[in-house]
Image (spheres, rainbow, N blue to C red):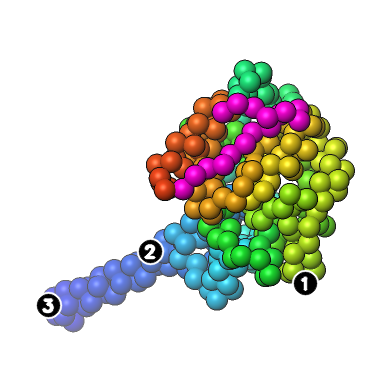
Amino acid sequence: MSTSKKCINKGIDGLFLTKIYFLIFLLVNCKHPQTLNIIQMQAIIDLINDLQIYDAIDELDDLGIDSPEYQQLKEEYDNGAKSDFVVRFKKFVTNLDKEAVEEKEKEKPSINIKNTLHNEGNNNIIFQGVNDSTLDLSIGNSTDKKKKLVKILFMAANPKNTQSLNLNSEYRTLQQEMRQGSKRDNFEWLAPIFAATLTEMMRGLNQQPNIIHFSGHGLNKGLVLEDENAYAQVVSNEMLGLLFKDLKDVVKIIVLNCCYSTTQAEFLSKIGCYVLGYNTPVGDKVAQSFAKGFYMGLSDGKDFKNALNSGRVLAMGEQPKDTLPLSVWKDGLPLEL
């Protein structure tokens, strides 16, 4: 064979090998959009376990997950997730790569992710009350980080025979505001309860929350929940007293973001916590603006009084034409604002 032919063959072989190497590089380094490796999966599961659902969704979106089942789960969460949502969402993530699940059981690696909750000393949070007494939200001295976090339970009810409210938007807004605060890692959002029934409220309270937020409709004689057919069911003040009795020294703040909730605020405050309510009808927008400012203040480490003022200022700034008929109660007595 002549020298020129040998050179041509070597050139062809070199080009062929270059293409092969390039294909191998793509196979090794490119991520399949519908699967996760063990590290990615564990990181997302950690977020789900900490109920940081929006962060988990952001991670999955960044990885290119776009299956119909995933889109359906996202839509459900935006429109009011069912009580078993967290379990189903976690199952979906683990099923993205079954081999990764088996590997996780063998290796169980330690993963550091950008939004993982972390310890900061005892994570003790002290709020100064409106009447200058001290509100202590410290949750023990256990080494378990979750027991040190201030647990927030969001409950909402909008029965189909009542005025429509934008409750899902309110929850998303409050959670997003708290995620931006400098002390956000001191708080843990429990799974929200939308379309709350009496049974679901009881289950939620059994989680021993430290801050309870109820959004919906209120009456002088009680709070309006939903029955099994999604119609209004009034939970009387007497029933509320029995429900909250075991939460004495556990719950520190209750926000009743609904009309005519002053009677319930007075009644529930007798267990020793601060309760915020409204003594007249209140507009949906101004109530949500107040709640946004109040939780923004808490997540930035403000004491109770200053967080309360943050909510009032934001309500006046965002809804200047609306009034805020807010009342605050402690130990069965109204507090001056």
Query: In this orientation, which residue lies closer to the viewer: 222 or 250?
Result: 222
Image-quadrant location for residue 249: top right
As for residue 296 lying within the magenta part, the answer is no
Residue 108: where, in percent of width, then height?
66, 47
The residue under label 2 is which amino acid type? Answer: Phe
Residue 25 — which label? 2
| Mark sitting earlier along the chain (2/3) | 3
Task: Tell me the amino acid under the disc marked 3.
Answer: Ser
| Element marked by disc 3 | helix
**Which residue occupies 64% across, 43% down?**
279
Residue 185 coordinates in the image, percent (x, y): 56, 35
Residue denoted by label 1? 229
For the residue carrying disc 1, how many other residues have a C-alpha within 10 Å: few (<14), some (14-19), or many (20+)? Answer: few
Name the residue: 58% across, 58% down: 167
Q: Identify which residue, 25 or 56, lies in the foreground.
A: 56
Point out residue 162 in the picture as x, y percentages from the top left corner.
Answer: 66, 66
Q: Nearer the viewer, mark 2 or mark 3?
A: 2
> Could one spot residue 120 in this view of the protein?
no
In the depicted structure, whether residue 131 falls above or below residue 90: above
User: Residue 17's quadrant in the figure?
Assistant: bottom left
Give the mark toward the camera: 3 or 1: 1
The answer to whether marks 1 and 2 mark residues whose Cβ atoms lie closer than 8 Å is no
The residues colored magenta run 322-337
State the residue position of label 3.
4
* Residue type marked 1: Asn
On-image quarter of the C terminus:
top right
Whichever of callouts 1 and 2 sits on the residue coming sooner in the sequence is 2
- Describe the element under mark 1 as helix, strand or loop: loop
